Every structure is written in C-alpha cells, then in structure tokens.
Amino acid sequence: MDDAALIRAAQAGDDGAFERLVRSYDQPVLRLAMNLLRSPEDARDVYQEAFLRIYRNLDNFRFDASFQTWLYRIVTNLCLDQLRKRKVRREEPGVLATPDGERDRLSAVPEKRVEGDQERQIYSRQLKVRIEEVLAGLTPRERMVFEMRHYQGLRLRAIGEVLGTTEEAAKNCLFRATQKMRAALGDFL
C-alpha cells in the first residue's frame, strides 16, 4: 500500500494502517529530530509528539502536499520550538566537559569499526568534530535546511514546503549554510 492508501484507511479507522505509516517513517523522523536537536531525549520527545499530532489530525490531511512533507513540517516546527526553549533556558544538552574544553557527547563515543589506518581514524574524528562544531554554529533554519538536504536527501522544493517557504528561499538558505561549512572546513578539504 502506498501512503495515500494507508492514510485513507487510517482516516477510516484502520489502526493497522496508521501503524504501518508510523513504521515507514519512524526512523527518518527520529534521525531528523536527532540531527537537529543533538539530544536523544529531546529527539524522542519530538518523535512522540509528532506522531501524536499526526494521529490526532489525520482526518484533516487534505493531500495538498505529500504525507512526508506534512510530517517533516510538524517535526521541524517541534524542533524549532525545542531549540527556542533551550535558548530561553540556556541549556547545552549533549555537551560534555573534557580537559580540552567542551565537546559534543557524540564525539566522545568510541569508534566501533576496526580500521587499519590510524592516521585516517584521527583525521576522520577531527573532521567529525569540526563538522559538528560548524553545524552547531549555523542558525537553526540553516541547519535544518542543510540536514534535510544532505542527511535526509530531500529536494529543495520539499524542504521549502516543509518550512513553509519557497524553493528559492530554501536554496538561498542552503547556499549560505554551505558557504559557512566550506569556509570553516577549508583546511580539511
């Protein structure tokens, strides 16, 4: 069954159809929330709230846009709300204090793969840390556009729809984010 058929069945009261919808989008939604929020707890909260809102409002879905666009719009709005709350609370979840300064908790997770090239492992870790730092320095909108394009694989038109803007505005935002990434990663490229 495609999304439209699942949505129609769920709108008619078929809970199994709704469960299949959730299963088909649960990992991408959780990944998007995690990439944007950098906090497993906050990502799980957004994930639950997004699917709860979908369940409550599925009868209002009019097929004007794709289900994925509608869902991602809800997720990105919830993430923006969460980021605004953090700013007000001045929290830095996901940050770990180390003797060398503060680092993202993800950078402290040991690499599980066995690689033969020690130099390449060091370079890879340094690049990962630098990318995380640059992503953290982008505006929330720039980071969302960058993440949706490069990590979720969405097209600019879909990103514009998700964010409630035009494809051109999404393209400009992606351009600014990419320019900032290139400038910050210049010595790695």
Image (spheres, rainbow, N blue to C red):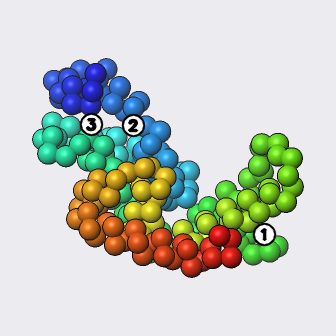
Q: Position of residue 46 (x, y in %)?
A: 42, 50
The quarter of the picture where residue 64 lies is: top left
Q: Position of residue 104 (x, y in %)?
A: 66, 64
Q: Mark 3 touching mark 1, by CB under 8 A?
A: no
Residue at mark 3: 55
| Residue situated in front as seen by the camera: 66 or 82 | 66
Q: Is residue 113 above or below residue 188?
A: above
**Residue drawn at (42%, 55%) of the image:** 148
Q: Which mark is residue 88?
A: none
| Residue situated in front as seen by the camera: 45 or 24 | 24
Q: Marks 3 and 1, Cα distance to the nearest angstrom?
A: 42 Å
Q: Which mark is residue 25?
A: 2
Please tell me whether mark 2 sits on a helix, a strand or a loop. helix
Q: Is residue 137 visible?
A: no
The quarter of the picture where residue 38 lies is: bottom right
Please tell me whether mark 1 sits on a helix, a strand or a loop. strand
| Residue situated in front as seen by the camera: 73 or 152 | 152
Q: Quadrant of the N terminus?
A: top left
**Residue drawn at (45%, 66%) of the image:** 143
Q: Earlier in the sequence, mark 3 or mark 2?
A: 2
